[in-house]
Amino acid sequence: MKKRNFINRIISIRKKEGLTVNAAAKQSGLNQSTWQRMETGESTPTWDALFQMSDSLGIFSKIVISE
């Protein structure tokens, strides 16, 4: 899966769960501005950051299984 597709899935699930960027970032331990830049495409996340984001939302298995 490409990183952009991965982040798009994270965004979709974050919104479905009703979480703001700030709340999701706090949950993951990432800085809010870092999370925001990755969502908007201003910054390319590492795979580790993507896994940290998805794991904090409890969605890693949903992303992997659905692909």
Image (spheres, helix red, strand yellow):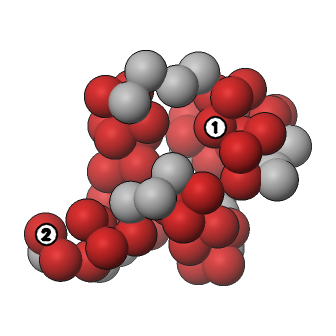
Q: Residue at x 78, y 39 (%)?
A: 26
Q: Nearer the viewer, residue 42 or 62?
A: 62
Q: Label 1: state its secondary structure.
A: helix
- Which numbered circle lies on residue 24? 1
Q: Which mark is residue 66?
A: 2
Asked if 10 appears above or below 61 in the picture, the reply is above
Q: How many marks?
A: 2
Q: CA distance from mark 1 to mark 2?
A: 21 Å
Instruction: Please state which of residues 22 and 42 is positioned toward the viewer in this rendering.
Output: 22
Q: Is residue 60 visible?
A: yes
Q: Is residue 34 visible?
A: no
Which is nearer the eye, 67 or 4? 67
Q: Image height check: is 33 above or below 56?
A: above
Residue 41: image quadrant is top right
Q: Is residue 37 left or right of residue 1?
A: right
Q: For residue 4, what is the image quadrant?
A: bottom left
Quarter of the picture holding the C terminus: bottom left
Near mark 1 (Cα within 10 A), the count class, few <14, some 14-19 or many ≥20, is: many
Residue 38 vs residue 54: left or right?
right
What amino acid type is highlighted by mark number 1? Ala
Q: Nearer the viewer, residue 6 or 16?
A: 16
For the residue labelled by badge 2, is the local secondary structure a helix, a strand or a loop? Answer: helix
Q: Residue furthest left?
A: 66
Where, quadrant-wise, is the N terminus in this rendering?
bottom left
Q: Which residue is at 46% across, 59% downward?
A: 58
Q: Position of residue 29 (x, y in %)?
A: 82, 53
Instruction: Judge the density around disc 2: few (<14), some (14-19), many (≥20) Cα neighbours within 10 Å.
Output: few
Task: Report the residue at 64% width, 37% height from top.
Answer: 24
> Is 52 on the left-hand or right-hand side of 54?
right
